[in-house]
Image (cartoon, rainbow, N blue to C red):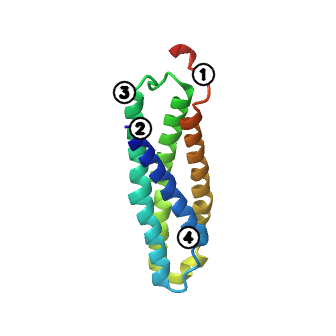
Amino acid sequence: MKLLHVIFSASWFGGNLSLILLNFMTPRPDTASALVLQHVIFHSIATTIVATASILSLLSGLLLCWKSSWGFFRHRWVVVKIIVTLVVIVFCATISGLAIEETIELSRTLGMEALHNEAYLGNAILSAVVQPAIFAILVFLAYLSIFKPWSKRKSAE
């Protein structure tokens, strides 16, 4: 189970890194169809790799807590990991996910004019801020898994 959890977490990490690279390294498309394709690829990575890996990482982590001596609430680092993971997944599934879908729709409807649309630009800024922030959070979650900081919770001792 530990191996599966590591694989799912690494997939989530790698998928998020792919989104960052697409966001910052891909040249601006020169046609409307290329613009739509760029966002469809971004959406595909976000929904197939990142979303699936994040859910499987959460589920395998919860299973590890249940089946191991760590428990769900015995260690502070486990509690923090569970809460942060849930918050990131819910945020990505709602706010970030809806922004990606709106960006696709705007690029389909407006074509290259989408690059001057206020909603489109707002979504681009959101993505440029959110993806690196999520990457930093995932690094923090990996840190918690590796170093297991903090003592046991008082009620669990």
The image quadrant that residue 130 belongs to is bottom right
Asked if the residues shown at circle 3 and circle 4 are in contact, with their CB atoms under 8 angstroms apart, the answer is no
Q: Is residue 81 above or below residue 135?
A: above
Q: Which residue is labeled 2 in the image? A: 2
Question: What is the secondary structure assignment of the residue under circle 4?
Answer: helix
The image quadrant that residue 57 belongs to is top left
In the rendered structure, find residue 120 and report the number of the disc placed on it: 4
Q: Is residue 82 above or below residue 154?
A: below
Which is closer to the viewer, label 2 or label 4?
Answer: 2
For mark 1, does the 10 Å Cα neighbourhood hold few (<14), some (14 to 19), or many (20 or more) residues?
few
Q: What residue type is labelled 3?
A: Lys
**Sequence order check: which comes first, mark 1 or mark 3?**
3
- Image quadrant occupied by the N terminus: top left
Which is closer to the viewer, label 1 or label 4?
Answer: 1
The front one of 48 and 10 is 10
The front one of 84 and 7 is 7
Rounded to the nearest angstrom, the CA distance separating label 2 from label 4 is: 41 Å
Q: Which residue is labeled 3 in the image? A: 67
Residue drawn at x 48%, y 58% is 15
Residue placed farthest to the front in the image? 3
For mark 3, does the 10 Å Cα neighbourhood hold few (<14), some (14 to 19), or many (20 or more) residues?
few
Residue drawn at x 51%, y 30% is 78
**Sequence order check: which comes first, mark 2 or mark 3?**
2
The front one of 28 and 10 is 10
Question: What is the secondary structure assignment of the residue under circle 1?
Answer: loop
Q: Which residue is labeled 1 in the image? A: 151
